[in-house]
Image: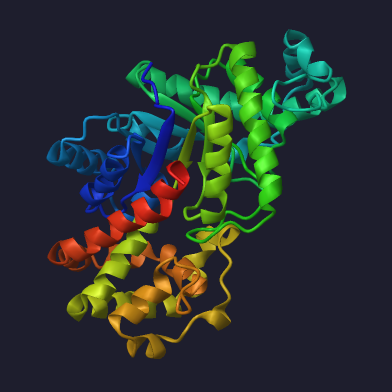
């Protein structure tokens, strides 16, 4: 089986022009002695919106790795695949994020739940887990309820894994994602889920549960940071216990589907990793696309004009653009400047509104979130947008590298 290193970080490159700039950030981090594996990801939804194919992600990543002679592991993620979408990702991907959130809560046959509990009587009583002060609150009824809610989702993960294995063999990394759902999974639930996945033969190396709090697209965490730290620490302990109890891969670790830019949580994650020696995979979203907009604005001229045009269209189509992401954005339309107002801004002023520096008085999280979900507006412009990325390669690339290194990788892995 292909092994995911202890530390890995997922990055998006929706228009396939920034892989070298992204890799430069990983190189700078590696120069300090901390090697983190880059994992390029692009979801089926994003490919559909932009009319691209998964092969383009591998091509861009491979070209960057060759050009910069990156000597460490790297991966291409089939991001949030389901049974109806996995096929198109089988060729170019070596990392598969299996998304089964839609199957959570689908009723499982009572006989199948009973059979699971018969195989796992240890889950029908409180479970002592090293690193957690009190035993996990489990008994027969609670274990049955958890299994009943998650068994069908885990079966679906098994079916998707079977299809991947038939095409690729074992030389892939498997992640199971349960984060895109309404309620967070508690540590007792996570333990039962891991037992269910082990029974399905899914060799997961990472699992992405839903954590408490808001993980909105492109902006910081909203929630109780202390509660997140307790939850994250307990989940790390549960994974260590499950690896031994159920024969799961030795490197099994948590995956944090951050929606990107969860700056408040980076010190927490770093502290837990230092204390426990655990690994982590952090998956960002579309910050690279936002850095492209920032770079075009800073470049001025035609780049700035196009950035303003994209905002103007987005401002006039807020409901349409936000609908697919309603659960992971919080935009107050009253806080969005008019297109006419933005038309009068300088390049640095527009860049400052979008760039995620909360202390900056010009930063506007509502503008940032709207542009975050408006990437398909640029996609509709086709070569006009990408031609400007090429023409302004240096300034755009500088924004991409600086953002990834200074706001993400260094705070998360260096402190």
Please state which of residues 208 and 42 is positioned toward the viewer in this rendering.
Answer: 208
Does 218 sit left or right of 103 as displayed? Answer: left
Please state which of residues 71 and 188 is positioned toward the viewer in this rendering.
Answer: 71
Residue at 52% across, 36% down: 255
Please state which of residues 185 and 44 is positioned toward the viewer in this rendering.
Answer: 185
Quarter of the image where one finds residue 377: bottom left
The image shows residue 274, relative to residue 354, as above or below, that is: above
Residue at 78% across, 28% down: 133
Quarter of the image where one finds residue 151: top right
Residue farthest to the top, as pictured: 119
Residue 207's x, y, as percent?
Answer: 54, 31
Asked if one can make out residue 48 in the rendered structure from this viewpoint, the answer is: no
The image shows residue 117, relative to residue 330, as above or below, that is: above
The image shows residue 341, relative to residue 377, as above or below, that is: below
Residue 242's x, y, as percent?
Answer: 63, 18
Residue 335's x, y, as percent?
Answer: 54, 81
Residue 300's x, y, as percent?
Answer: 21, 78
Asked if one can make out residue 295 in the rendered structure from this viewpoint, the answer is: yes
Residue at 19% across, 42% down: 64
**Quadrant (top left, top right, bottom left, bottom right) of the N terminus:** top left
| Total numbered labels placed on residues in the image | 0
| Scheme of image coloration | rainbow
């Amino acid at each position: 089986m292909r092994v995911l290193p202890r530390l890995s970080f997922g990055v998006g490159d929706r228009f396939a022009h920034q892989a070298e700039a992204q890799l430069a950030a990983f190189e700078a981090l590696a120069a300090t002695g901390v090697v983190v594996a880059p994992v390029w990801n692009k979801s089926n939804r994003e490919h559909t919106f932009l009319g691209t194919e998964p092969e383009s992600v591998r091509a861009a990543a491979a070209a960057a790795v060759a050009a910069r002679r990156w000597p460490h592991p790297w991966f291409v993620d089939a991001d949030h695949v389901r049974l109806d979408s996995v096929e198109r990702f089988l060729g170019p991907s070596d990392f598969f994020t299996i998304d089964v959130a839609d199957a959570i809560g689908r009723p499982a046959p009572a006989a199948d739940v009973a059979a699971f509990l018969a195989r796992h009587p240890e889950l029908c009583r409180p479970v002592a887990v090293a690193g957690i002060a009190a035993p996990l609150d489990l008994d027969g009824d609670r274990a049955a309820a958890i299994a009943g809610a998650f068994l069908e989702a885990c079966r679906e993960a098994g079916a998707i894994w079977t299809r991947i294995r038939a095409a690729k063999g074992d030389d892939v990394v498997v992640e199971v994602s349960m984060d895109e759902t309404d309620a967070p999974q508690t540590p007792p639930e996570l333990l039962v889920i891991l037992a269910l996945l082990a029974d399905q033969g899914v060799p997961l190396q990472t699992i992405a549960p839903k954590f408490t709090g808001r993980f909105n697209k492109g902006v910081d965490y909203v929630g109780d940071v202390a509660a997140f730290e307790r939850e994250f620490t307990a989940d790390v302990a549960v994974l260590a216990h499950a690896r031994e109890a159920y024969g799961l891969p030795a490197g099994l670790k948590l995956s944090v589907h951050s929606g990107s830019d969860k700056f408040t949580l980076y010190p927490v994650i770093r502290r837990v990793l230092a204390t426990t020696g655990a690994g982590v995979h952090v998956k960002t979203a579309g910050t690279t696309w936002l850095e492209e907009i920032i770079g075009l604005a800073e470049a001025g001229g035609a780049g700035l004009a196009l950035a303003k045009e994209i905002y103007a269209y987005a401002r006039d189509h807020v409901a349409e653009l936000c609908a697919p992401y309603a659960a992971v954005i919080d935009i107050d339309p009253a806080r969005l400047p008019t297109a006419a107002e933005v038309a009068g801004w300088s390049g640095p002023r527009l860049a400052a509104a979008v760039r995620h520096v909360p202390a900056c008085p010009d930063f506007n999280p509502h503008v940032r979130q709207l542009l975050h979900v408006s990437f398909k507006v640029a996609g509709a412009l086709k070569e006009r947008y990408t031609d400007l990325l090429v023409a302004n390669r240096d300034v755009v690339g500088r924004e991409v590298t600086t953002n990834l290194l200074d706001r993400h990788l260094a705070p998360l892995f260096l402190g």
